[in-house]
Image (tube, rainbow, N blue to C red):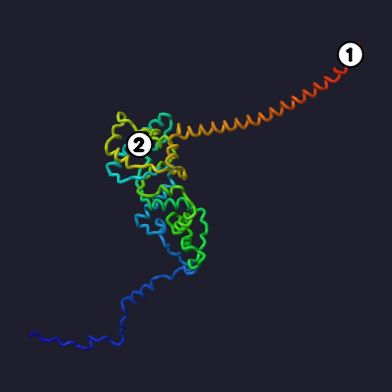
Amino acid sequence: MPPRIHLQPQQLRPSSSTQYVCRQCRNASVASATTPAPPIEQTIHAAAPIARYPPTQPPSYKSPEFRKTQLHRQYQSLLRSTQLMLVFQHNNLKSTEWMGIRRELATALRKVDEELAKNGDQDSLSSDVKLQVVQTGIFVSALKVVEFWDPKFEPKIPEQDPTDPKTASSAVIPNTKPSKHDKMIQHGLSKKAHAIAVHRAKYMRHGLEPLLSGPLALLTLPTVSPQHLKAALSILSPSKDFPAPKRKTNPGYHEPAVQNGIQKLMLLGARVEGKAFDMEGAKWVGSIEGGLDGLRGQMVAMLQSVGAGITNTLEAASKSLYLTVEGRRTMLEDEEKGIPEEKGESETKTEGS
């Protein structure tokens, strides 16, 4: 066996003069010794508050991570940036049918752009016209926010007590008192916008309530163009006023996939510059000859005719008054001239007798 090594116990035991110091305390003492004192301005002024929400993602009524929230934001932007919108009801269209309809619609709109370019109009709208399917419930909610909520003018919603017997249960409005930070937030997805839109929808109407039910599809145009609307109606909703293209000129339109898809589309109405139109009103907009220029010409002619009628009416009254006065004046002059003549005639008769 190897020899045992005898260790001295005094070497293992610490001396009474040494002290144990933990590592964290040692680091803190070193940091306190090396870190300078904060400036006086930092101690006087309070630190800036931490933002509750990032600037690129403001708070919303529902979580922005949901697809419904993003669709709500998209539909609001679509309603605010679109001046002409056609509402269709679709019934189980297949993807091949949608592809064929969109292809024929784009072809018809490009032809309209080419015709307008020949006349000197360089505005091209065919690339901005879109036919898309929307979620009906989310679209209705976005339409209420766009129609009934204005960030520049936000009325105060009166708070009502649900325990009050005089207050109806349907008229109770949730408490939506925003904080100081929320007052700076003005967007269509906020809780205040949702509350105001729901409250105003109880006694206000936007005109499209009977149409917004079932599966919906929208045809959106950025500007009001009767020529493009006429071409779109001839493809999506052909009629006597808007005949469909013939087979010789456009054989692709008469393919079975396109025809089956068009039969499943039904025109319900339109929204033109924020106003609701029925099916007949939408067709009237598309039947304007000459487009907006023709409509302006009709308005100018109508105003000119109205002005000419008013001028003729005023002139007729003045002319009749002038003729009456002149007739009375000539009558008085004739009477004054006829009195002495009658006296002279009477004297000559007496002398002759």
Compare residues 102 and 328 and report the one nearer the observer.
328
Compare residues 187 and 352 and report the one nearer the observer.
352
Compare residues 143 and 201 and report the one nearer the observer.
201
Residue at 46% in and 68% down: 39
Q: Which residue is mark 2?
A: 235
Mark 2 vs mark 1, CA separation in Å: 99 Å
In the image, residue 26 sits, relative to residue 343, either above or below, namely below
Quarter of the picture containing the N terminus is bottom left
**Would you say 323 lies left or right of 202 here?**
right
Compare residues 22 and 262 and report the one nearer the observer.
262
In the image, residue 6 sits, relative to residue 242, either above or below, namely below
Quadrant of residue 58 within the rendered picture: bottom left
Q: Position of residue 328 (x, y in %)?
A: 76, 26
Residue 178 seen anywhere in this rendered image of the structure? no
**Would you say 343 lies left or right of 266 here?**
right
In the image, residue 163 sits, relative to residue 149, either above or below, namely below
Quadrant of residue 14 within the rendered picture: bottom left
Q: Extreme top residue here? A: 352
In the image, residue 254 sits, relative to residue 341, either above or below, namely below
Q: Give the residue type that dot 1 points to.
A: Lys
Q: Give the residue type that dot 2 points to.
A: Ile
Question: For numbered disc 2, what is the local secondary structure?
Answer: helix
**Would you say 308 lies left or right of 236 here?**
right
Q: Which residue is mark 1?
A: 349
Mark 1 closeness class: few <14, some 14–19, many ≥20 residues within 10 Å: few
Dot 2 or dot 1: first in sequence order is: 2
Q: Position of residue 187 (x, y in %)?
A: 45, 54
Residue at 37% in and 57% down: 64
**Would you say 57 lies left or right of 335 here?**
left
